[in-house]
């Protein structure tokens, strides 16, 4: 099987949905349904909102590496007191988000900025929560980025991140694809805990995602269709609806089982940490 690079594939999807609010909304909903990491991140956001941030008049959130703005949409529509500062290095992604979120920008609920997390400083002690989803694995200087995020959090502020785990490397054989844009294969619990502590963050919870059930769902719902797109191109769209008619319900059930379990290992990792008060 041929290799797949996620970034060029994502860029293609971005071009297709660039100026269609309907297609972009459907794209967001598809990401939330098909990608198990979104299940984990949204659950963590809900949990900490109820636990710590629901009574704030203004819940200030940093989205470090906002990408398509998937989690920004979820946050704005789920938490009425949320205000977001969304940062990304890709100006075209930011422009697309500014178009889609223009009403929220006008209401003062979200603003976007181009930032290199490796070199640019962030506003000091300005946020109650920082989100960093599938970003750190791309960055060699990950501890430096975590340190900047820690400084940007207020004392007691929460950091939620998701990344591939070190087990993801075992899933990449010579005949299978692997995301070779990454600076590292992924994190172990020990490695991530040590790096969070080194950056001045206090690890609260480390949980492997995409365990036995979640990984099978990912192969079924994501990996196989992406391989088809790589090999056959747009003609894949002709049979993809029939494929998902057979696989969507089993795949969603497997992801639900993954979320409910305590995975001993998995190809993803969800990390939650806190800036000491």
Image (spheres, helix red, strand yellow):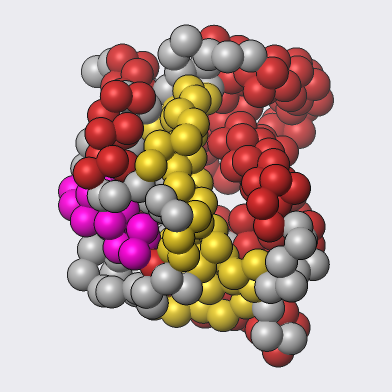
Tell me the quarter of the picture where residue 241 sits: top right
Residue found farthest to the front: 277
Quarter of the image where the N terminus is located: top left
Q: Is residue 220 left or right of residue 180?
A: right
Instruction: Classify 117 as above or below 237.
Output: below
Q: Residue 172, percent across and down?
A: 32, 20
Q: Which residues are magenta?
A: 137-151
Q: Residue at x 39, y 67 (%)?
A: 152
In x, y percent, where is residue 13?
Answer: 55, 56
Q: Residue at x 46, y 65 (%)?
A: 154
Is residue 96 among the parts visible in the rendering? no
Is residue 196 visible in the rendered image? The answer is yes
Does the magenta portion include 233? Answer: no
144 drawn magenta: yes
Residue 30, compared with residue 90, is above or below; it is above
Q: Nearer the viewer, residue 89 or 3?
A: 89
Magenta: predominant secondary structure element?
A: helix
Q: What's the residue at 26%, 29% (across, down)?
A: 191
Residue 248: where, in percent of width, then height?
75, 25
Q: Residue furthest bottom?
A: 106
Q: Is residue 70 above or below residue 196?
A: below
Q: Residue at x 28, y 57 (%)?
A: 147
Point out the image quarter for the C terminus.
bottom left
């Amino acid at each position: 099987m041929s290799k797949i690079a996620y970034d060029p594939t994502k860029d293609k999807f971005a071009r297709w949905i660039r100026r269609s609010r309907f297609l972009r909304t459907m794209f967001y909903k598809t990401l939330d349904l098909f990608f198990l990491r979104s299940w984990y991140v949204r659950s963590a956001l809900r949990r900490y909102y109820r636990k710590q941030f629901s009574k704030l008049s203004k819940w200030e959130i940093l989205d470090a590496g906002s990408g398509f703005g998937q989690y920004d949409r979820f946050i704005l529509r789920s938490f009425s007191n949320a205000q977001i500062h969304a940062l990304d290095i890709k100006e075209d992604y930011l422009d697309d988000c500014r178009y889609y979120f223009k009403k929220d920008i006008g209401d003062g609920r979200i603003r976007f900025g181009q930032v290199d997390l490796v070199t640019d400083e962030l506003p000091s002690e300005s946020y109650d929560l920082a989100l960093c989803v599938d970003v750190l694995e791309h960055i060699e200087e990950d501890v430096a980025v975590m340190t900047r995020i820690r400084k940007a959090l207020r004392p007691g502020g929460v950091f939620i991140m998701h990344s591939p785990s070190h087990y993801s490397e075992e899933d990449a054989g010579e005949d299978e694809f692997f995301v070779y844009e990454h600076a590292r294969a992924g994190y172990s619990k020990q490695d991530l805990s040590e790096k969070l502590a080194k950056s001045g963050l206090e690890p609260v919870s480390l949980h492997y995602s995409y365990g036995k059930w979640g990984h099978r769902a990912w192969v079924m719902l994501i990996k196989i269709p992406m391989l088809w797109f790589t090999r056959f191109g747009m003609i894949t769209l002709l049979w993809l609806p029939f494929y998902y008619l057979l696989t969507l319900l089993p795949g969603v059930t497997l992801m639900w089982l993954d979320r409910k379990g305590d995975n001993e290992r998995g190809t993803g990792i969800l990390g939650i940490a806190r800036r000491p008060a």
